[in-house]
Image: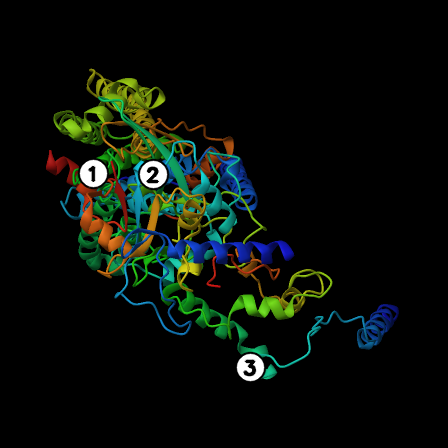
Amino acid sequence: MSENKSRRGFIAASTAALAGLTLAPGIRLVEIASAKPDNEPVTSKVRWGMLIDTSRCQSGCTDCVTACGKENGLGEVKKPRTDAQWIRKIDLKELKSGHALSLPMMCQHCAHPPCVDVCPTGASFKRADGIVLVDRHICIGCRYCMMACPYKVRSFVHEPHTDQNPEVPRGQGCVEGCTLCVHRVDRGGTPACVEACAAAGHNAMLFGDLNDPESAIAKRIREVKTTQVRADLKLDLGVRYEGI
Amino acid sequence: MKAIVIAVLWGLTFAAAHAAEPGRTPLPAIAIEKPGQCVEPKELMRRDHMKLLQHQRDKTMHQGIRTKKHSLNECIACHAGQKTGTVLGKDGFCQSCHEYAAVKLDCWDCHQPKPGQKTAGAKP
Amino acid sequence: MASASYVETQSRPAAFWGLLVLGGLFMLAAFAAFLHFEHSGHVVTGMDNQIVWGMPHVFAVFLIVAASGVLNVASIGSVFGKPAYKARAPLSGLLALAMMAGGLAVLAADLGRPDRLIVAMTHFNFKSIFALNMMFYSGFFVIVAAYLVTMMDRSLNPYSKVLGFLAFFWRLALTTATGSIFGFLIARNAYGSALLAPMFIIYSFAYGLAAFLIVQGSMYAWNNLKLDERILARMKNLLAVFVGAALYFTVVMHLTGLYFAKQEAYERFLLLDGGMYTAAFWLGQIVLGGIIPLVLIFAPGATQARVIAASVLVVLGGLAQMFVTIVGGQAYPLELFPGYAVSSTFQDGVVNSYAPVLGEFALGFGGIALAFLVTVVAVRVLHFLPQDDFAKLNAED
């Protein structure tokens, strides 16, 4: 318990410190979103998104992956074939130029998610604020969403589990994927990966409200060239990349 | 023939006598270890807790409503056994009653039956 | 009266019980595999996060597609009014129900949460082609069962034509939807083509008729009967047309792929470098399931045995085709970043391997065993053996 307390304290302090860090006047690295009251439903006024600056993302660094595993009770990847991986690092090398880069890949939180279209029961759904989730209560484990996802960011839970984080229920036989740490976001927090990236000083991940023109992420997207992966599919992604 | 009837009758009486004995009938262990009031009246909880939980579940899942009153995690926080630290197990608050009523519980395929730490990223 | 007399099918009780035991053993093995998978999780199967649909789906989709195709025999009888096929309509309807049940059972047994099957029937996402399929499947049972009753109950005979039409259109819609399960996937190179729907219909014609010929041949052999030469000739030629059409669609599909630059790498993988997928395509789907059956059918002096051999090969080729379509389609890596070489802990950029375990085959064969048992019992207790009206046949000639 004391360990938890100290961890919380550390994160609170580091978040507060980061809040003061600015890239340029008016642009904060970590956006501290105002928390919505617990009893109010999320609305489509907000569209949560993420911007990943690949120039700041180092090959070999897995801070975001580790943080995700810890936060969501996934643990370390021991069986790469069957263990759940909500976020993974991809190393890229351009075939012609040899230009190398590294980036995290996770659920892109599409505005038009193919996984939601194909799900027979409606377990795969998109929240009003753009977060794409799996309602495990009605997921039958057919894995059609995994066939449909162009980014293969979903995992099937292949084994029974007992070590869940109480706030992130997960169990055998359902499909799951990045929730954008919805349990934290609903309280005004940021996803664990973004926090870890900032805490380590990399600052490669920016989280915020794409719909708010004043948000750091919206401003940055206006200023620099950003890419949506497989933009040809026109899925209108919530996760954007810089420097591809 | 007579002997059989007597044997059967004797057997029935024996069984009935033992059933009436306290401790022989497997009643659920409803141990409320923490003092205080539940979020709703006891009668309502006994009858309708599943409706409340399901209602809350859908609101949390789809609308992000995270009020504590009917949240499963709050139930666990209060009702987990002091010694076992869980709502499951032979005398666990959820399991013992559900076993008695023969109603399958599948909450725990995914949910954590032990009260745990709050997430680190919650707003300070 | 030239119609064949009713043939006693209650013969050879020992052999009959032997068949039931055989089917039962396969069902038992499938049930054991099901319990094992559900208890330990899919980690004990060969499927993983890359190959999410494996052997059970190969068998399940094959059975479902063949089930809709086998009904074609009845449709030719009732919709197109051919007496030789009309005599076979009840058996065709029975096989359609039995194979559909087998396929769906396998599909359900492989779910991550089969205990929530009821959820799949109470929560519908109407935009999902998979949900639509479930409605088509349920409707298929109702319509085909009603069609069977109208055919077998003389007093209801007048309704059988209408129901025959309904069943025909329903099964076309159903197979369209089944093909579209893959056709509507935008993500992967192997899928996302409107051609998949008509191609699955053609496949279903071939697989269904092949399955029908196998069952019909076994029933005739059981009763020491010989199928009329003319009927055999017609049915084998029809099978050849279907097998040829299936080959044609396959060729067109891959020619299109070869023409589109973005599909070239995938076509190269499937047709040349794909290892077991390439082998399954060329040897299984094309040679075994296409060319050899055509040779067997068209070589002079085709006998009943040879037609059945051709049919068995078409079925094997069909399973190979499903393997290529379903597993091969997933094995080829998704291309997220064109022009880049990629690597990750999640098998990005690599061809995914798949080594099915015995249990997956057991599950698949369990579906076939279910269809087999339903058929064996039904033909034993009811009159499903084709009763040809030779007067009409002679008049037609």
Name the subunit of mark 3: B
In x, y percent, where is residue A200? 45, 43
| Amino acid type, mark 1 | Leu
Q: Nearer the viewer, residue C134 or C340?
A: C340
Q: What residue is drawn where x is 61% and y is 67%? A: B77
Secondary element type, mark 3? loop
Q: Which residue is mark 3?
A: B40
Quadrant of the snapshot with the N terminus of chain C: top left
Q: What residue is drawn where x is 49% and y is 51%? A: A71
Quadrant of the rendered image containing residue C328: top left
Q: Which residue is mark 1?
A: C196
Classify mark 1: residues with Cα within 10 Å, few (<14), some (14-19) or many (20+). Answer: many
Quadrant of the snapshot with the C terminus of chain C: top left
Residue C160 in view = yes
Q: Is residue B41 above or below residue C133?
A: below
- Outermost right residue: B3
Residue C87 in view = no
Q: Which residue is mark 2?
A: A56
Quadrant of the rendered image containing residue B7: bottom right
Q: Which dot, 3 or 2, sits closer to the camera? A: 2
